[in-house]
Amino acid sequence: MADKSYPIPGDDFSRYGGATSHLPKLEVDDLQHAGPPPPPGTVHNPPPPPPDAPWYDPRGWSLRTRLIAGVVVVVVIVAVIVGAVEGTKANRYPDYTQLDYKLVDTYSGTSFLDRFNYFSDEDPTNGFVQYVDQTAANALNLTHATDSSVVLKVDTSNEFAANGRQSVRLESKTTYDSGLFIFDILHTPYGCGTWPALWLTDPVNWPTNGEIDVMETNNKATEGNAVTLHTTSGCNMKVKRKQTGSVAYSTCDNSTNGNAGCGVQGEPETSGQAFNENGGGIYALELRSAGIRAWFFTRDTVPDDISNSSGSPDPSTWGTALADFPNTDCDISSHFSNQSIVANIALCGDLGAQPQFYKDQYHCPGTCSNFVAHNPANFTQAYWEFRDFKVYQAQ
């Protein structure tokens, strides 16, 4: 059996077609032999280990290090993308293109008051004030209109206003979704305990339809006027803006910062005694989908296209606004609609009676409500006087 050979048929591989062409050809020199054993006493030296990989070569990293590095890379990529998006957003600015404004409403002369409703309900801002209806306002002479101007004021006759001093709050019967509003103002109210405002809002649907404070001060008003927006959530002003005023807050949401809104503070001469002694001035408010802007003009800086009532005012020629609220991160049209023009003089209330204003800033005496009740002579300067209001809309 041992000497018997078993020849391999010649076609054992040929059945697989070209398979034999892929078999490697072995030469004698290709065979690896262990060779003869080393001579006695020969020391075996193993090959040196490969050098350590440099720290930056991931082939030398542990699995944990690789995972951490992967996470870091992902975080960096996300940060770069977010930074690019926010950077682009920060540099965005709306196109306030020129609009063709035409006069649609004028509030002036003896018919001025006929264009307004007298609010006479309880003050929604918790003031120590009694808002009176038109009949009572006429009897107390708290509102009166002439051919040249109209006056709204606080009562100065009641020696002891135990339940709040009488005042007025007017709300225009006509409402607006957009427009250019020109307010010619001769005198603004001021004095301890006062909280006057000239503003736009939808009184029935606040804050859903927004609020724009064109003028708002409190007490002695020596700090100047604040132009402020109040909205529901989703309106922010931490974006590129072009304005001369200083920012108070950038979030307009009424549920934040104690309903402070997003305000822009003007210089002292923009309201109060300084404003009045300079002969008053003009506030212009533009409400459009691109944004909301407000300008203040002293008597000697009023643009010709405002002075000339037959013209078409062009805000693009007026220079930098006092306050600028662009639509970059706030859909203006969805946050502001059905706006009435409101003028009022509140007393004390959520703003005027706050200790940081009443006491700390303006050093007014006693408590706000007690002072208002017992000091009618304090309110001789607590009145609005308007020459007229004009409303333009784009054609």
Image (spheres, rainbow, N blue to C red):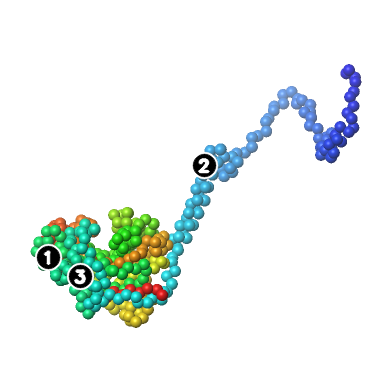
Q: Which residue is mark 1?
A: 376
Q: Residue at x 17, y 69 (%)?
A: 135
Q: Secondary structure at mark 2?
A: helix
Quick one: label 3, few (<14), some, or many (20+) residues within 10 Å? many
Q: Residue at x 64, y 35 (%)?
A: 49
Q: CA distance from mark 2 to mark 1?
A: 73 Å
Q: Secondary structure at mark 3?
A: strand
> Would you place residue 63 above or below residue 382 in this image?
above
Where's residue 153, x and y in %? Answer: 18, 69
Q: Nearer the viewer, mark 2 or mark 3?
A: 3
- Which amino acid type is marked by label 3? Leu
Q: Secondary structure at mark 1?
A: helix
Q: Which residue is mark 2?
A: 68
Q: Nearer the viewer, mark 2 or mark 1?
A: 1
Give left or right: position of 161 versus 318: left
Q: Nearer the viewer, residue 104 or 386?
A: 104
Q: CA distance from mark 2 to mark 3?
A: 69 Å
Q: Nearer the viewer, residue 225 or 267?
A: 225
- Which amino acid type is marked by label 2? Ile
Q: CA distance from mark 1 to mark 3?
A: 16 Å
> Would you place residue 25 above or below residue 103 in this image?
above
Q: Is residue 190 visible?
A: no
